[in-house]
């Protein structure tokens, strides 16, 4: 199901109050045209918001590929990573999330970010929130559709996700584009040997505490 963000300040304020009253937390976008934007996070549930330090480290690692990139944010959660990537110069993003609770936060965040872009005369393309199964939705994407794909699945899902979706990720990624993944630190050996069969070369990999950020580039 596609949720098309359409900005309305009054509706956003009401939704923000509701979600904060439900115990949702928030983080802030730290740079770019949406700097300071409060990102509602679906805390206390199965989705695990990327920690601030790890999020910033991942975005800094991706900086060489951000400008003008069409971004796909898989297992998007709050959408914080995708929104900050676009804030730093990406052309737009599509967010994919299956959790109904996370979708509430994600939709609110996408609405507010879109509103800020409109006020600054910034056109976002794509800018969509997709509610549904990641595996199904990426199979429906056309070839060479994205310059940058970010994925933050639950850590226990990472090996299965990479094996099942690797071919589709490579298909929808443009030549020279990058696929970035957050995973557990103990997946380092597995991730270093993954990718070649799909034409993806490991370009960067760094560990931050219990988290590992890996970036592959399509040949």
Image (cartoon, rainbow, N blue to C red):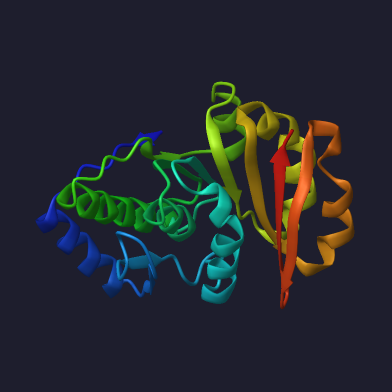
At which x and y percent is residue 112? Answer: 25, 56
Q: Position of residue 82 (x, y in %)?
A: 46, 52
- Where is residue 189, by image quadrant? bottom right
Position of the C terminus by quadrant: top right
The count of marks equals 0
Q: Is residue 117 visible?
A: yes
Residue 46: tell me if it is visible.
no
Identified at 30% across, 71% down, the residue is 36
Q: Residue furthest left?
A: 10
Q: Position of residue 110 (x, y in %)?
A: 32, 51
- Please say if 101 is above or below 45: above
Would residue 184 appear left or right of 150 to someone viewing this image? right
Q: Residue at position x 41%, y 56% from top?
A: 88
Q: Is residue 52 left or right of residue 128?
A: right
Front residue of this view, candidates 55 and 100: 55
163 lies above or below 16: above
| Residue at 82% over, 61% down | 187
- State the residue in front, 91 or 152: 91
Measuring from the top left, give residue 169's x and y in whole percent: 66, 34
Query: In the picture provided, is 5 more to the left or to the right than 130?
Result: left
- Above or below, 159 against 147 in this view is below
Quadrant of the frame with the N terminus: top left
């Amino acid at each position: 199901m596609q949720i098309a963000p359409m900005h309305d300040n009054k509706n956003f304020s009401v939704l923000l109050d509701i979600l904060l009253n439900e115990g949702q937390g928030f983080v802030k976008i730290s740079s770019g045209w949406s700097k300071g934007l409060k990102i509602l996070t679906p805390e206390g549930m199965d989705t695990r918001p990327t920690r601030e330090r790890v999020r910033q480290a991942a975005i800094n690692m991706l900086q060489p590929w951000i400008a003008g990139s069409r971004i796909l944010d898989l297992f998007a959660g709050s959408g914080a990573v995708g929104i900050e990537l676009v804030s730093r110069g990406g052309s737009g993003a599509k967010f994919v999330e299956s959790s109904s609770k996370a979708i509430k936060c994600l939709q609110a965040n996408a609405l507010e970010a879109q509103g800020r872009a409109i006020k600054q005369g910034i056109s976002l393309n794509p800018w969509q929130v997709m509610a549904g199964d990641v595996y199904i939705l990426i199979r429906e994407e056309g070839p060479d559709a994205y310059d940058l794909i970010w994925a933050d699945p639950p850590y226990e899902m990472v090996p299965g996700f990479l094996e099942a979706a690797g071919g589709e990720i490579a298909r929808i990624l443009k030549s020279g584009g990058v696929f970035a993944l957050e995973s557990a630190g103990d997946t380092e050996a597995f991730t270093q040997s993954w990718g070649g069969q799909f034409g993806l070369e490991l370009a960067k990999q760094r560990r931050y505490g219990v988290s590992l950020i890996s970036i592959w580039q399509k040949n």
